[in-house]
Amino acid sequence: MSSRLATEIAGLKLKNPTMLAAGILGLSGSFLRRIAEAGAGAVVTKSVGLKPRVGYPNPTVAQVDCGLLNAMGLPSPGIHNFGEEIKEAKKGGVPIIVSIYGFSPEDFAEVARVAVKEGADALELNISCPHVEKTGSEIGQNPRLVAEVVREIKNKVDKPVFVKLTPNVADIALLAETAVKAGADAITAINTVRAMTIDIETTRPLLANRIGGLSGPAIKPIAVRCVYEIHRRVDAPVVGCGGATTWQDAVEFMLAGASAVQIGTAVAIEGLDIFKSVAGGIQAYLKKMGFGSVKEIVGLSHQH
Amino acid sequence: MSVYPTSINRPRIVRIQRIREENPKVKTFIFQDKHCAEAKPGQFVMVWIPGIDEIPMSLSSINPDGLSSITVADVGEATRSLHQGKVGDVLGIRGPYGNSFALASGKAMIVGGGTGLAPLLPLAKSLTKLSAKTHFLAGAKTRDELFFLERIKKAVSKVEFTTEDESYGVKGLVTDLAEQILKKEKFNMIYACGPEKMMLRMLLLAEQYNTPFQASLERYVRCGIGICGSCCVGEYRVCKDGPVFSDKQLGKARSEFGLFKREADGSRVSF
């Protein structure tokens, strides 16, 4: 890959602006390493909490047109059992961003502390999971709680903190601004959109939790709009996330204001080669359009 | 417009057409589904038991007329609920998922233990159709745990059974019998499905006797489509890269294969 693709976000050096999104294939260190080796510029782990958590019973994933619904229920071995996975993942040679969740600011801070001790290069705060009570978006929809959580973590660790926001709010830019004022180094936008699907033959909601989060191409225009609004409001870098499947999608996110783009659901459709193909496509685009660096296109649509 | 293969990934509602009791703990559930009719030996489906759970199950029979089956041991909440089910009950089926056994002509050894026998029966039938000469070894602790006896005998030319308490067939472990046979005979392929320690032992034997090897693995599965990561073994996903793995792949996954699996919370549990 050429240096045209190299970029930097909140102090993290990325060989290209693609990242694995949180929640996708991120519980096993060996697999995260494989994704790094497949060409991702950075990988984000599945969200890890303080204590082991089984999550919801199946079905936890349901197919809908143009996307996937999931309600995993934040399964995690707990941060104290996650060190080996982080160490294994680091062998992939790209930054490891550990996604963390908690049920209180103190919870979050403790998970953050242990994650950093175990080798996390950065943290991504999941204050946006739409289907678990007392955490996720219940925190991320409340500016006061967002500020408290971010401040508490920034007091405890000296690694970059990404804050992943929920689109299920009236003004996502306000939450981004709140997080950045509290010390967030970067914003990831967006998490899944609250949604549900019902099996018409059994008349039952398909997901065991009934309500889950929608990901995939269906939410991409929402995500692009959110990135655009956040980039307009805050100076901190934004990482785009939500339905990106092709290099054109990634470029669109970057023109809206994303410094990097996370890929999640598309891995199920395109396989692990997607990181190389998206990065390669961005590179060809930059060359064709006469840009010397991927940094030059970040937020370019705002000039119009 | 859907960008996803929705017809495969959305549960298709089927009714249980027949239930066969294989042994005191194992039952076979037969249903009609057009996608399963086109499945290959080794592939699995996600079985939705409405209101209870959704679990991965290998197809234990695949018929072009559309009647397929899963063979289920009563080991947990979901499987117990299935066992209590009756003809006419509704299940959701999505898939078939994963890869399949690579069929090799020539001489094959199949080694099965416990409910690992389920995907091996359609494999045995396919090998026979291919005119492969197949030696099938099936092992269990005791006679009551074995199943498919008659159907295996009908499917292949040579069958031997082992039980640890000598209640049926040869006394001992199926892997010990396999070793004795491998000492004398050369095979073109060894297939295995069963407890992971058994499969690890077979991998070592296959390496020792320089014979290609494939094994079908089991893990906790959520999505079934290679995205959630619940079922990882080393750098592989059982649902997408597997469930059947070659000796070469298992060699690369030796830091996990036969040693530990991940539970629903992602924590490691030793075998």
Image (cartoon, coloured by chain):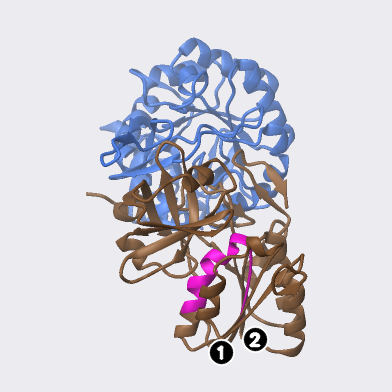
Chain colours: A blue, B brown
Looking at the image, which is closer to me, B236 or A276?
B236
Q: Is residue A68 left or right of residue A113?
A: left
Callout 2 secondary element: loop
**Does B68 sit above or below residue B179?**
above
Taking the magenta stretch, the answer to whether it contains residue B29 is no
Q: Quadrant of the C terminus of chain A?
A: top left
- Marks 1,2: beta carbons within 8 A: yes
| Residue at (59, 41) in percent of width and height | B264
Q: Evaluate whether residue A281 shows in this view.
A: no
Q: Circle 1 sits on which residue?
A: B106
Farthest left residue in view: B1
Quarter-of-image position of residue B195? bottom right
Region of the chain picked out in magenta, as a range: B109-125
C-alpha distance separating marks 1 and 2: 8 Å
The residue that mark 2 highlights is B187
Q: Residue at x 56, y 46 (%)?
A: B230
In the rendered structure, does residue B116 fall within the stretch colored magenta?
Answer: yes
Q: Please, what is the three-letter code of the amino acid marked with disc 2?
A: Phe
